[in-house]
Image: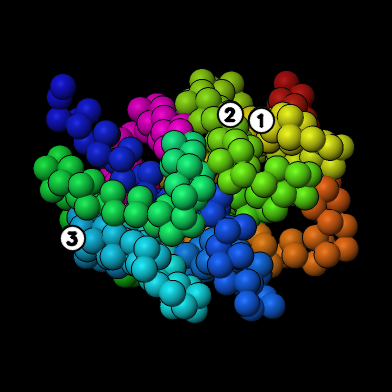
């Protein structure tokens, strides 16, 4: 096995750490809420335990990106992985829910650096089709890793809601691979001197902001699954955490399959066309939950949503890496990381009023309809571009 293959395996392993930031403890939420049931706001606070890392990731990522461009990748990555294990594993023993929220916030700061650096390294080490192919494999590997971790978490949660926090300690053995197989890329060294002076402008800035807004909405929508699905399952009579996690397993498995196929799909479609399909499938899947009255129906709806969700991350990452110069990769991808986790954090905050009014089924229907609207917007952009292109060809004849 050559050095580059080991390098890719190392990047894939580290990528799974970002998946564990939130979804890992999702199956434990109902039992966690019961454990802190003496508080009237226990259900809301436990959902915040799930999404608190996302807030700090969103706040920290732009700064992480700037530091990565200025000081390099690997030293910051190693420190972040150690911090990740300490903050993530703290849930094994913390008794106060507010201290638990603080530990989750610190975990989020570590993840901000890890995710920004890993995606930046993909851009540094790989180019062209190889980069797109790897991003698809990375998305699939992360989704598959999420499936494994959520499944294990569901089993551990049946014993104790604290046990899933032990999985965060995996970052320590992963650290060995970082020391052994990764090297500081030349792009980081050459771009450090002018990194502070470079800022995106004009069309590039508009592109970045559009992609950030798109991935924000996509992640807010996707996080309906880990944040709300366990409670939806309870409302239809599924009370075992291990069974409730099956819906999460299904959406991540179908997402993994689509992510792995991303480069093949991208060979036929533009970035905008991929987004059309992404939000179409997520809209149909989440909207179908409204008519699902049993466990099987909910799981089938999650499978449909996963067909779109699996393309969201590789398409976003590839689009930005294809348009960001090496000296700005850290900051551009730091902005992407911020948008992703802002979407995760605000998902339960934005959804909670809808849950109170429309309950869980109606909330999924409303979210599905909004996703279809976004798909329609991208379809309109695709058709507008094709009309202009055809008109230009006609006038040029």
* Secondary element at image label 2: helix
Residue drawn at x 33%, y 61% as measured from the top left: 89
Snapshot quadrant of residue 304: top right
Report if residue 385 lies within the magenta region. Answer: no
* Secondary element at image label 1: helix
Marks 3 and 2 in Cβ contact (< 8 Å): no
Q: Locate residue 332 relative to residue 120 in the image: left or right.
A: right
Residue 247 visible at all: yes
Q: Which residue is mark 2?
A: 254
- x, y percent for residue 233: 71, 45
Estimate how packed mark 2 is, as few (under 14), some (14 to 19) or many (20 or more) residues with alpha carbons within 10 Å. Answer: many
Residue drawn at x 34%, y 54% as measured from the top left: 166
Position above or below: 311 against 172: above
Marks 2 and 1 in Cβ contact (< 8 Å): yes
Estimate how packed mark 3 is, as few (under 14), some (14 to 19) or many (20 or more) residues with alpha carbons within 10 Å. Answer: few
Q: Nearer the viewer, mark 3 or mark 2?
A: 2
Report if residue 130 lies within the magenta region. Answer: yes
* Secondary element at image label 3: helix
Q: Which residue is mark 1?
A: 303
Quarter of the image that includes the C terminus: top right
What is the magenta range?
118-145
Q: Nearer the viewer, residue 108 or 384?
A: 108
Q: Which residue is mark 3?
A: 75
């Amino acid at each position: 096995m050559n050095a580059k293959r080991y390098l890719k395996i190392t990047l894939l392993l580290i990528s799974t750490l970002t998946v564990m930031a939130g979804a890992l403890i999702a199956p434990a939420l109902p039992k966690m809420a019961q454990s802190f049931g003496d508080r009237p706001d226990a259900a809301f606070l436990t959902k915040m335990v799930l999404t608190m890392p996302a807030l700090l990731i969103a706040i920290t990522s732009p700064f992480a990106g700037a530091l990565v461009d200025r000081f390099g990748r690997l030293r910051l990555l190693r420190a972040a992985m150690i911090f990740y294990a300490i903050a993530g594993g703290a849930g094994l023993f913390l008794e106060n829910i507010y201290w638990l929220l603080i530990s989750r916030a610190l975990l989020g700061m570590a993840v901000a650096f890890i995710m920004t650096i890993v995606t930046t390294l993909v851009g540094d080490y790989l180019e062209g089709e190889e980069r797109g192919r790897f991003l698809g494999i990375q998305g699939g590997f992360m989704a598959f890793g999420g499936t494994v971790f959520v499944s294990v978490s569901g089993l551990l949660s049946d014993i104790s809601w604290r046990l899933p926090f032990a999985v965060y300690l995996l970052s320590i053995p992963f650290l060995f691979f970082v020391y052994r197989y990764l090297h500081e890329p030349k792009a980081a060294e050459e771009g450090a001197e002018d990194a502070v002076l470079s800022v995106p402008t004009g069309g590039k800035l508009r592109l970045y902001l559009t992609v950030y807004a798109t991935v924000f909405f996509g992640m807010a929508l996707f996080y309906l699954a880990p944040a709300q699905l366990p409670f939806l399952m309870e409302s239809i009579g599924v009370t075992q955490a291990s069974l409730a996690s099956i819906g999460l397993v299904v959406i991540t498995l179908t997402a993994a399959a689509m992510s792995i196929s991303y480069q093949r799909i991208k060979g036929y479609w533009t970035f905008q066309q991929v987004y059309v399909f992404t939000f179409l499938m997520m809209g149909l899947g989440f909207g179908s939950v409204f008519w699902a009255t049993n466990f099987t129906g909910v799981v089938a709806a999650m499978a449909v949503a996963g067909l779109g969700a699996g393309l969201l991350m590789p398409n976003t990452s590839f689009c930005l890496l294809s348009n960001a110069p090496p000296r700005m990769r850290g900051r551009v991808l730091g902005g992407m990381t911020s948008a992703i986790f802002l979407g995760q954090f605000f998902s339960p905050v934005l959804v909670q009023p809808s849950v109170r009014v429309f309950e869980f089924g109606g909330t999924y229907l409303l979210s599905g309809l909004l996703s279809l609207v976004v798909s329609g917007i991208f379809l309109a952009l695709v058709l507008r571009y094709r009309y202009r292109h055809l008109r230009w060809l006609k006038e040029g004849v």
